[in-house]
Each structure stands twice: as C-alpha cells, then as structure tokens.
Amino acid sequence: MLHLLQQFGGALVFYTIIPLPSRWPLEFQRIARWAPWIGLLIGVLLAALNFLLLQLPLSGFLRGVLVLAAWIAITGGLHLDGVMDTADGLAVPDPDRRLAVMSDSRTGAYGVMAAAVLLLLKVGAIAEFTSPRACILLGLAPVWGRWGQLVAIALYPYLKSEGKGAFHRRSLQIPQDLWPSLLLLIGISLISIAVEPHQWQSHLGTFALGLFLSWGVGTWFYQRLRGMTGDSYGAVVEWTEVLIICCFSLAVH
C-alpha cells in the first residue's frame, strides 16, 4: 500500500502543481498508470468550481474563462505546451525535421494558432455546461483525456531514446497498468446508470464516445508522426478533452 501511495504522490506532483509535504516519499516509475486517476481528481475540482460559479450572476463566457484558467493552473500548462510543440512539428512538410522542430523551445505560428483554437473551443463548450448533470460530464473530460494518453503510451512506439515522456513508455507494464483505470471508467458509467437508470442509453453513449475519442486522437497523431513523443502525449490529452467536452455540450441540451 505504501508503494502505491508513493507512486500516486509522484503522479500528483508530475501531472499537477498540487503540493505535497517535502518529506513525502515519491516514486515516479509507472506513474502513467495513475494519470486517469489524477484526471478524476482534476475533474472533480473543475466540476465543483463550475457548479459554484453557476450560482453567481456571471455570463457563460466569463464562467468558461474562469474554469479554463483553473484547468490550466492545476496542470501548470503541462499538456498545453505539448499541443503547441506538436502543431509546430506537424506543420513541417519534411518528416525528418519534425522532431527537431518539436524539441525547439520557441513556439511558432502554428503552435499559437492551435493553442488559441483549443482554448476557445474549451471556453465555448464550458459555457454550455449549465446544470448539475452537465458539471459531472465536464468532470469526466480530464479522465478520458488521460486515458487516451495511457492508451497512446501502451500502443505506439516512442520516437526518441530520451525525452520527458520516454520513461513512461519504458516503465509501463502492459496490460496490467491499463486495467485499473479502465475499471475506473466502467465503474463511473455503472454508477451513472444506477443513479439515472432512465438515462442508461445516454451513459452508455458517453462511455462509447470516450473510448472512441481517447483511442482515435492518439491514433491520428501516431499516423502522422509514426510514433509518439512527450509533446504528442500532451497533445493527445488536450485534444481528447476538448473533443469530448464539445460533444458533451451538444448532449446537455
């Protein structure tokens, strides 16, 4: 149990800016398997914040901006940086130069445009989440985004021998590191069906959509990069999240 707590603490420190006591022993091996659970924590915080802001006389746009600001702050912009670097890399016609461009610390025009589009889509979608049920759906997005990252780590080769995501690929144990978070997602769906049995089709559809998008986004990046990097892992998280909340925003009406 202590070993698992040390791993969870390592995942919390790596994936968020949530502080832990300096004496807390941390372990960073195999922390990728905890990413969806960290997503659940982030999702609960975002859902609670959105629900509280709904009690104030704020416009949907302003509420969306505030929730998004909290979303970025909790993660320290870790995955957003990957969105920008990956967009800059994909903009290069020569596949042999893409990794060099993605490794450049400078952000290009395509990276800025990708980030701007993604952030605007998130704000617009969050503005539509105006009910308690919608808040719950919002909270699921970080879980599915990180499940997508975990699937990409498991399925696709890493393009570099070193890098900020290389240790994820080396230390991940397949399939045993995938089952706990998949059971988490199944459990969330079953609880949702138990609470709202009349909405069982909607909850099953939500689960199916999450599975499809979390697999599909990673596959799309793999087909264009022929492998994964730490930046593309971040891009998978962000684009899975935004596609899911955009789809969910249609379902809440």
Image: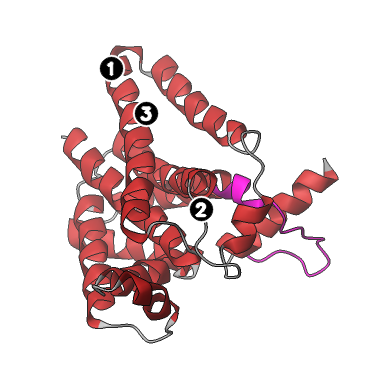
- Mark 3 and mark 1 residues within 8 Å of each other at the beta carbon: no
**Image height check: is 57 above or below 179?**
below
Q: Earlier in the sequence, mark 3 or mark 1?
A: 1
Closer to the observer: label 2 or label 1? 2
Count neighbours of disc 2 (C-alpha within 10 A) and say few if under 14, some if 14 to 19, many if 20 or more: some
Q: Which residue is mark 1?
A: 201
Start-end of magenta stretch: 19-35
Q: Which residue is mark 2?
A: 157
Among the 4 quarters of the image, the one containing residue 120? bottom left
Q: Which residue is mark 3?
A: 207
| Distance of label 2 from label 3 (alpha carbons) | 26 Å
For the residue pair 236 and 141, the one nearer the viewer reads as 236
Q: Earlier in the sequence, mark 2 or mark 1?
A: 2
Residue 206 visible (yes or no): yes
Lateral position of residue 222 relative to residue 59, left or right: right
Name the residue rendered at 66%, 34% in the picture.
176
Mark 1 element type: helix
Residue 90, image x and y in percent?
A: 28, 68
Residue 236, image x and y in percent?
A: 39, 54
Count neighbours of disc 3 (C-alpha within 10 A) and say few if under 14, some if 14 to 19, many if 20 or more: some
Q: Mark 3 is on which residue type? A: Phe
Lateral position of residue 108 relative to residue 70, left or right: left
